[in-house]
Amino acid sequence: MSQDNIVEFNHVQKSYDGETLVVKDLNLHVARGEFLTLLGPSGSGKTTVLMMLAGFEVPTHGEILLNGTPINAVPPHKRGIGMVFQNYALFPHMTVAENLRFPLDVRKISRADAEKKVQRALDMVRLGQFGNRRPGQLSGGQQQRVAVARALVFDPDLVLMDEPLGALDKNLREEMQLEIKHIHEQLGVSVVYVTHDQSEALTMSNRIAVFDDGVIQQLAAPDMLYEEPDNAFVAYFIGENNRLHGIVKQVNGKSCEVELENNGGTVKALPVNVAGEGQRTTLSLRPERVEVNPTNGIDNSFDARVEELIYLGDHIRTRVRVCGNDEFVIKIPNAHGHARINRGDTVKVGWALQDCRALDA
Amino acid sequence: MAQADITQDTGADGRLDKLTTADGTPLKVSIRRAMRRNKLIAFGLTAPLLFFIVFSFLMPIFDMASRSVENHQIPEAMPRTVAVLEGWNGQEVPGEAAFEALALDIQEGQRTRTIGRAATRLNYQEAGMRSLIMGSARRADQLEPPYKQALLEVDDDWGDLDVWRLIKRESGYYTASYYLNAIDLTYSDTGEIVAQPEYRQIYVMLFVRTLWMSALITGLALLLGFPVAHLLATLPARHANLLMILVLLPFWTSLLVRTTTWIVVLQTEGVLNDMMVWLGVISDDGRLQMIYNQIGTIVAMTQILLPFMILPLYSVMKGISPSYMRAAKSLGARPPVAFWRVYVPQTIPGMGAGGILVFILAIGYYITPALVGGQSGQLISNYIAYHMQQSLNWGLAAAIGTILLAGVLLLYATYNRIVGIDNMKLG
């Protein structure tokens, strides 16, 4: 047990109905001062993990440590964990300042100190003038900031956030992501953040735990997660990717050959998570790592027929038919001298062995 | 300007004057024209209800309110007397002219059978007036001049100054005497407003009793209903549905059945007393009187009105997200504190709606107190019914009813001022 970890989950399991496990043998450590995101589709168990940490759900098995002490039997109000809820849960009958004073009042903090802390927290989220408003009189983004301020006003070491930006529109959401990230950096507080939005997770986190089916599929820093996914689910869930299915023909240390379905040809790939020769595998290839008219000597090179071009401003999204797959996407950056291609053309496309990861089937 | 259909006229002072459509019609006019069809359809759909409410609700209420001040019986049945008494100073028994007018009124009233109404009307004010007038009317054809002597021969009460003062006082088309009566006041012989003699004071006491019993019933319903509504709102759907049926089942049962069931339970030889005797809580001679008194009214009415408290509370509680309580706990509030400071204030619209509903229903309740209230459990509405059906003094019934209605409206206005009627949620 290390003092550097503010939270530890040891072999935690959770079942609601006694028949299926929502969380299966979770072992997770959150470092002090870390911004850790639990990312996953709905029903993957990520919110359950957060609720167990907050104390609203009891683990069926296993132990949760907070600052090195087991908290399984500690009720939520004694855990001292700040929490931001999905729909903010600002108390509608209190003003903004009263909402912020609530956690201080129940801690019997003197009136003068409380006022000071409330004002400081409001200033931190740039709502210094809004103390006397009711939550209902604020915009969604302002309510969101009040909720963050309220979760932080009593100086907790750990703050939990349950999809706090889900109700905001895209621009506001991106603005709030940065704001929360900056508050985290300023205060040095540990944050456990739940979301199903991968770009949100990539923007804000130190580390991301990708959940699926009650299991952490991969726990890594955002760049590692994107560039080196361990399995097909993570590759599929984080960012866009082309998937090619095939059978492993040969494995030679750091490379393997995969024969694709539908007579798609043979591809050289990086064996990351393959069961062995003769087994099925899924190849994962990021669209931006595919070159059009590649330089000679590239590991994989195929003829592709251009099916569709979508102009997206900064890049041109190109759908081609290659290797027996007509859902293959290439991103062509809209840079000077980029390849000019037309629908119906046949072009050469290619990619390096390291960018094509052979994962589980 | 890029807009094709809307042009803006700018007034002489440069201010935007009005918007017009492309053909020059003011925008507001053309919007109104476009909306007219929808408005007509909407009105057509609500019209049956509107007419129903006007005929079955507003008009009867207006009719009732006017009955409480109407006094046409006397000026209509005794026009001559009323005219003569107009110039009378009221200091002594009037002279022959008044007696002549009275005699002619009585004779004509006897012929047209209208004198009885005036007699009944005057009898409300002073017992004995009906027999005085009807006694004279039976011998109307014997009345001959000089009328004063003739009438005094029929009944020497005609020589009583107070009788004449009463007739003069009630000779207008409108009277305040029903309202005075409804709040235990009356006119003294000299025409001043004074308290009724103590043995006739009853209505103020009844109003007070109705108000406090209704308040108590509302409080009890809130106390009993709040936990049930909370359970309904928080239990898983399967259990909540069962509980909801238990709440609604009595609601669907006949009022009469429920009331009489309480008689079975609460009477001296009833279930509850039997059980307590059997358990040894009370002795067989010490059986408790729990019905045909205020306890009976309170118990039965609380039970009957409970759904009216539970349903609005439930609908409000259903809308309170459980995340509020969680948020309060995560912020460090112990569960009771979180409940009291975060949950309860959010149920105020439901408490207000349920409270006002139960209170208003309670102050007008009639059947239950009539059946289980005995003497001490009667409410003001039982006396309204009594005056409608037994004493036939509709004017007094109307006056009491109007006071009750005014009280309810006042309560409603106060509630609106304090809590705001927009905050009320009935379901």
Image (tube, coloured by chain):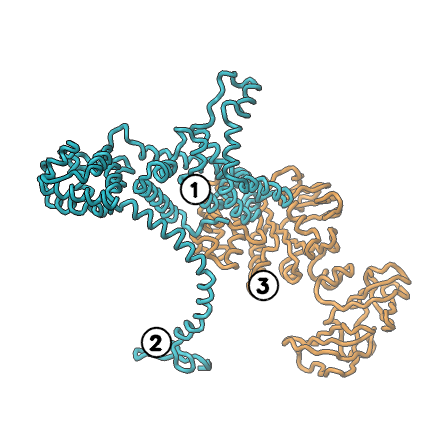
Tell me the amino acid under the disc marked 3. Glu
Cα distance, mark 3 to mark 2? 43 Å
- Report the chain holding disc 2: B
For marks 1 and 2 on the same chain, the one whose residue lies earlier in the sequence: 2
Q: Nearer the viewer, residue A136 or A211?
A: A136
Q: Is residue A312 left or right of residue A121?
A: right
> Residue B312's x, y, as percent?
50, 46
Which residue was labeled with disc 1? B361
Q: Is residue A23 above or below residue A254?
A: above
Q: Nearer the viewer, residue A40 or B189?
A: B189
> Residue A24's x, y, as percent?
75, 47
Which residue was labeled with disc 3? A174
Q: Residue B17: give its label.
A: 2
Tell me the amino acid under the disc marked 2. Asp
Quick check: do tags 1 and 2 share a chain?
A: yes
Q: Is residue A254 above or below residue B262?
A: below
Residue beneath the point at 89% across and 64% down: A251
Whether tag 3 and tag 2 are in contact, CB under 8 A, the answer is no
- Give the colour in which the image draws chain B: cyan
Identify the chain drawn in orange.
A
Which secondary structure, mark 3? Answer: helix
User: Is residue A314 in sight in this rendering?
Assistant: yes
> Residue A258's x, y, as percent?
87, 67
Q: Quadrant of the N terminus of chain B?
A: bottom left
Which secondary structure, mark 2? Answer: strand
Quick check: do tags 3 and 2 share a chain?
A: no
Other-residue count near label 2 (Cα within 10 Å), few / some / many at <14 / 14–19 / ≥20: few
Quick check: do tags 1 and 3 share a chain?
A: no
